[in-house]
Every structure is written in C-alpha cells, then in structure tokens.
Image: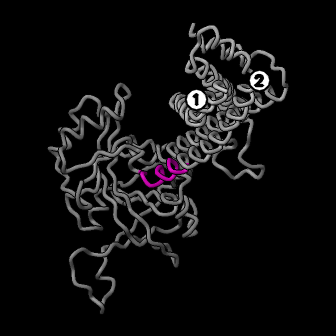
Amino acid sequence: MNFPFYIAKRYLFAKKSHNVINVISGISVAGIALASFALVCTLSVFNGFNELVATLFTKFDPELKIVASQGKLFNADSDMVNEITALPFVEECSFSLEEQALVQYRNSQQIVMIKGVEESFYSTSGIEEILRGKGIFMLSDQVFEYGVPGIGIIGNLGCGMQPAEPFNLYVPKQGERVNMLNAASNFNSSSIYSPGVAFQVNQTKYDDNYIIVSLDLARKLTGYENKASAIELKITDDISIKRAKKKIASILGSNFEVLDRYEQQEDIFKVVKLEKFISYLFLTFILLIACFNIISSLIMLMIEKQADTNILKSLGADSSTTTQIFVYDGILISMLGAVSGVVLGTIAALLQQHFGFIPLGANGGFIVDAYPVNVYWQDIVLVLATVLVVSYISIKPIGKLAKRVIDQ
C-alpha cells in the first residue's frame, strides 16, 4: 500500500486530541455529501422533465421526419419514397403538408395550421392514444372531407365534440393578384366535417393550433400539387433511431435533413438542457465552497501532527512524502463525502422515480402527480468527476502550505 495514503487513512479515522478537528472534518464531509446529493437529485429531476416533455410529443410527432435542407417544400418524388420504404427497418412512410389557414365555425373563426397527411399517419404517429371523443379517426370518404382538430380549437370555436355544422377552411391562393373587389376569390376554400374526435397532446402549440386533414385536401387548398413539407417515418424496433437516422441521411444526401423527435422540438429541449446546465453550475459553485472547509480541517490537522511529521522526517521521509499525507487526507474527505452523497442521492431519486413520494402540488391540474425523475449513470459519473476536480482545485494549495508547516 502507498505509505502516504496509508498514514492519511489512519489520520482520517483516528481520534484527534482536539475534538474540533473531528467536527470540522465531519462538517466538510457533510457539506460535500449534501452538495453531491443535491447534484444527483437535481440532474435526475431535469432528466425526468426532459423525458416527460418527450412523451408529450411522441404520439403526434413521427419517430423520424425528413424535411428539405433549404426552403419549406420539396417535390413528392415517389422514387425517393420507394427507396426509403425498401429499407428493412422502415415500417411506415408517408408524406405530410403543413400550411396556415383560417377556420370558421358559425360566427367564430381562428388562424390555424392545417396538417395534410396520408392515411398511414394513423400508424406512423400512434395518434390513436391521444384521441378524445366517441367518433373514429378518419380524413375522407366517398362524400365528405373530414378534419381532426386539437382539443383547444374545439373550445375556442365553441363547437363541441359533435359539431352540428361543418368547419370552413380558407387558404390564400398562391401567386395570384389580390382582388379587392371580391375578397372571397383570393382564397381556396373547403368545408370539412368532424369525425367526432379531437386530439389532445397537452401542448398549446398543437392543441390550440393544428387541424389534421387529408393530404389531397391540403394540396387542393394550398395549390401545391405533388408537393410535401415532410416525409414521416416509423422505424422497426430492431434498430436504434440514431442508426436509422444516419443510414437514411447517407441515402438522401445534403438536400434533406433527417430529424428525430428531439430535433423536431429543438427549441423546447434546448431550454430544458440550458436550465439543467445552469443548475449544475450553481450547485458546483456550492460544492466548491463546501470543499474549502477541507482546508481549515487540514491546517488544524497539520498543526496537531507536527510531532508525527518530525518523527517521519527523522526516519528518512522527505518533505514531499509528508506533504502527500495531508493532500491524500483532503482527497479522502472529499471522496467520502462524494460517494455517500451520490449513493444517498441515487437512492432518493430511485425511490421518487418508482413511488413518487414528493407531489408536484396539492391543487392538482398537472400532467403528472409527482416530480418526474430519471437516473442516468452518466450523471453519477459526472458528479463524481466534478467532486474530484473541484476538490483538487481547493486542495492544491495545501501542498505548499504543508511544506511550510512541516519545515518549521
């Protein structure tokens, strides 16, 4: 065993003649343990919120979405789709077209985003799990065109889940001169009926703004024949989304971008990541302050152990060896606090993850009842590495200080 490390371990657990040294050492361990505990729990909570946000979009956004690198639309080339669907890991593939429109129901109206999709959208998105109402999901039949609105639009228009009249959609005509004398001629219009269902993502962006219609109707209203704004894919379970995305991107080249669900909602997830990073920095600063308590503990230990260091020097130990004893003692204090804090933090996070002891609020109204938590092993490694680095920064001056005390 390393001699300085062995002596440092004995000094750490041995009873000191001055009880205040034990107290300060205990406070140092407790401070680091508390900061490590807070880091693990805080990072795990942010992981939980990140996963929660991801699940909110899972049933509406596709697993992979292909969009044009430049511009809003691209030609709906069937050869390209055939090449993609030929891949063994592509389970479903469909075009979609999005455009703003005005929806009117009786005397109420609202600007919305119509999303034209193919019938396969039902299986590529898994939207059946977020449908509300007693009807069925359908976009057209031999007689009528249908539209599935967000639950918020139902409330804004005051039409209920079973509207007595159809909705009227209006989309400005593309590339035509505006006719001020006949305003209605500036729009393509169509009536759509409700199939008796609405979707609920629990996000205002979708629930209050989107109406799902057939792709043919969206093209008729926008005038974009044989155009699409995206290709939506569902991937089989035998391959990771990351690998599938990389493979498809290599086939399509630089003219297209392949987006996973996180990239489709990049702005929202960027905010969550930024909040997590700021919390990490704030708690790391608290950890740094806690680590400085180690210095006072080591200074008092050096003074108490001067007689021991003189004996070690007389036995042949040089200054660097005796200095390392106190450096190791500081590292042991920090790692003891870190390990205990990480273990307790992981246990607390796992208990919250499985049992939800801490609720979000007494009034309810939240999507989940308790704080969402998800423990990642990467975060545990990050916390241990952070404690090690911060401890080294705070203990580094001890080497020179120990030399002065020992050489006196």
Residue 261 image offset from top left, x and y in percent: 41, 44
Q: Residue furthest bottom?
A: 181
Relative depth, front residue between 74 and 114? 74
What is the x, y in percent for residue 292? Answer: 66, 38
Residue 304's label in the rendered image is 2
| SS at mark 2 in the image | helix
Could you say where residue 346 lies in the image, as x and y percent from the top left?
64, 28
Out of 317 and 367, give the one closest to the viewer: 317
**Which residue in the protein does label 1 denote?**
399
Count of numbered badges drawn on the protein: 2
On the question of residue 343 being in view, the answer is no
Please give the name of the residue rendered at 69% of the width and 29% of the height, measured from the top-left corner.
298
- Label located before the other in sequence (2 or 1): 2
Residue occupying image coordinates x 29% and y 30%:
89
The correct choice, above or below, for 56 with respect to 356 in the image is below
Which image quadrant for residue 7?
top right
Q: Which residues are magenta?
A: 265-275
On screen, residue 87 above or below 230: above
Mark 2: few, some, or many residues within 10 Å (few <14, many ≥20)?
A: some
Please tell me which residue is depicted at 72% across the width and 19% down the height of the picture: 12
What kind of residue is marked 2?
Glu
